[in-house]
Image (tube, rainbow, N blue to C red):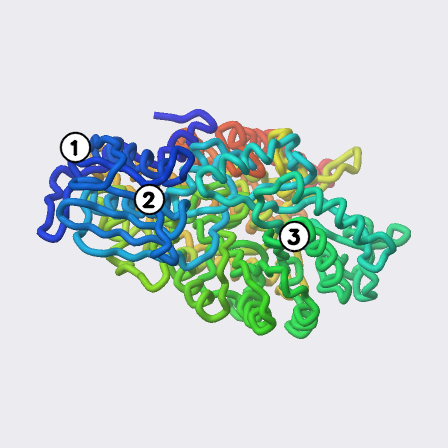
Amino acid sequence: MSERNYDFRKRHWAYHKPDRRDPARKVKKNEILITNEWKIGCSGDKDSIALIAVKDFQEYLFTSMGVSIALTDAPGDKVIWVEVSKKVKKGFVVEVDKNSVTLTAAEDKMTFKGTIHLEDIMNLEEAPVLEVGKLVRKPLYKSKIVHSGTGLDYYPDEELLGLLHAGYDTIDLFLKGIDQNNIGYCDFNEIIERAYRFGISTVFHNYIRTYVHPDDPGAQEVFDKTYGEICRRYPKITSIGLCGECLEFPSKDPRTTGKPYHESVVDGIPDTRPSPGWFPCDDYPAYIQGIEKAVHKCDPNINVSYSTYNWGYAPLELRKKFLENYPKNVSLSICYEIFSQRKLEGLHTPVMDYTMSADEPGYYFTSECAEAHKHGITITGNVNTAGIAWDFGCVPLVPAPDKILKRDLNLRIAQKKWDVSRHYCTHHYGWWNSVAADLGKWTSWEGFEPDYEELLKKIAIRDYGKKAAPHILKAWKCFSEGMNYYIASNEDQYGPWRVGAAYPFIFQPNISRTMSDKAIKFPTAPHAHFGYKIVKTFYTPYENAEQTPGFLRYPAELRSLQKMLEHWNKGLAAAEKAIECADEKKKDEARRLEALGHFIRNSTITVMNIKKWWQLNMAMQNSATAEEAEAYLDKIEALAYAEIENAKDTIPLVEFDSRLGWEPSMEYVCDKWHLEWKIRQVTDGALREIAAYRKMLNLHKED
């Protein structure tokens, strides 16, 4: 069975999975069973979210549990009744007795969260049962923000309803201009209005630039014209998110270039100072204040948020000074793991970009949260709790629940300690309805936590069956352990980790009559938001002032990746065993976990091979003799053939699961076509050049 590209959307949007009921599950003494005799209704009118929630729950019972119940307009015996009451101050309350269920919410949109929570309970029990008694649930966080999981700024109703069922309540849109994102025209208000209809809020990720200094004459008029117009055109947005790299300005701080990064040159000589988007300039707070004034002049209820991740590397003293002058009515977005200081065999290997391999929050996160909280600044955590990051750029999930859960639990502490009350749960790589979403939901209630070991067991049984569950749990453990040895360097996350086994292997000696650059433009769809621009194909260390140089790191990194590979292979063996044991109707889910793990394993092999490739290419070009160089060339050639086989082994995986090899901002980068492209690149490019170089090494013998 194979899928065509984008077929994964059908599965992604199946938020009510069919036939989830276990006929062997009996009703316990303290439970009620919802049967066809029951009815469901609400106190809301035809335009209420409560009515949408009721109809959705009615559909859930029919699709997932095989129970058909009618609508009613009044509470009573054998009725599930949904209502809004001021008696509930926050969240919702569910009261269950032998003859009725009443769900009372603090506000209309909370009714939907309530019925979805009932779905979650029933799904874990694999039966339409509820425990008799009173259940109180209060959201711990003010918002949980995601980008679409099926396409950049792509939000059909199925996507909106899917993300609600996965535990998210706010969507993020890329704003490049009025009704313009980075792809082209986008009817933002149409998306915002439909989301609002389901109780989903909308935030803008701002790309609009106002290249003006706050002290310039007329600067505030520029801010008012730009950001005031955004608020006027989109009256139902709830937040505007800003960040340095998307919002450079002509800073007068002499520690910066005062120019955009691509213009920071003098007579062709690069200015090595940071550009204003990557440094906490003295005048940046005033610049942000100008934007805030423009927004709040139009609508004081819109949240303005600024992300400092572009200078999270900076010393605390610099960041503290910035926050001392930071506008108190602008919230701060802080990344959980970026710039975490790691050491590998005594070498400095800090986290350079988003990764699920980090359990604990980095110093940038903890220090910035503490300082912002001290100044009364509200905080948004940039947290990747949707379970995906740049670790493997084109997969739906890092299947490492232990790592995800630890992060979720640390964020509960951050909420209590610093009031980190909003979560940006995923960047533009989207979300997937998965164990990560489940953990995100169950760790997001105020004053309530389940037994997490029991929860993971129930999730495994729900999705894979009782016999397969022990093997699934073992696979998750192995994958989680394997992530402890993951390498989060820029050259890897912008290279082979990003596109997997489709990553090209470029022979490094420049055999050329045209003196061309050896980097290849990675083939991506013309309409892709980023596409090839975030894939670096000529593999070489991207050095950083806080990081040990690549030639010293690579031997240690290869040893670490070998350990990761060993754990990953153990996890794959457990996943393969789960396929054998899975219930027949759940075998495909087990196959998809194995395919995901297999895809990541092959990506790991590619990363290891490209590091060896770079080492051998460097060593060969520094050889003392032709014979020594030819010995290196033999090893380089062997790696080329090994990568061809690795790409071939990956093709059946992406044919089986069309979500593998795709990411919203790049589109497809490791589908069958790209894997075959890589095979052609190695065969017709690298291997031909290797043969030519071998001949060059022996030219002197022909004289």
The quadrant of the picture occupied by the N terminus is top left
Q: Which residue is mark 2?
A: 116
* Image quadrant in which you'd find residue 271: bottom right
Q: Dot 3: what SS?
A: strand
In this picture, residue 582 sits left or right of residue 258: left
> Which kind of residue does numbered mark 1 sit on?
Asn
Residue 130: horizontal and vertical position, in percent? Answer: 19, 48
Sequence-first tag of 2 and 1: 1
Tell me if residue 653 can be seen: no
Q: Which mark is residue 242?
A: 3
* Image quadrant in which you'd find residue 161: top left
Q: Residue at x 49, y 38 (%)?
A: 195
Sequence-first tag of 1 and 3: 1
The quadrant of the picture occupied by the C terminus is top right
Callout 1: 10 Å neighbours few (<14), some, many (20+)?
Answer: some
Callout 3: 10 Å neighbours few (<14), some, many (20+)?
Answer: many
Q: Is residue 342 above or below residue 383?
A: below
Q: Which residue is mark 1?
A: 36
> Which kind of residue does numbered mark 2 sit on?
Ile
Q: Is residue 380 above or below residue 464?
A: below
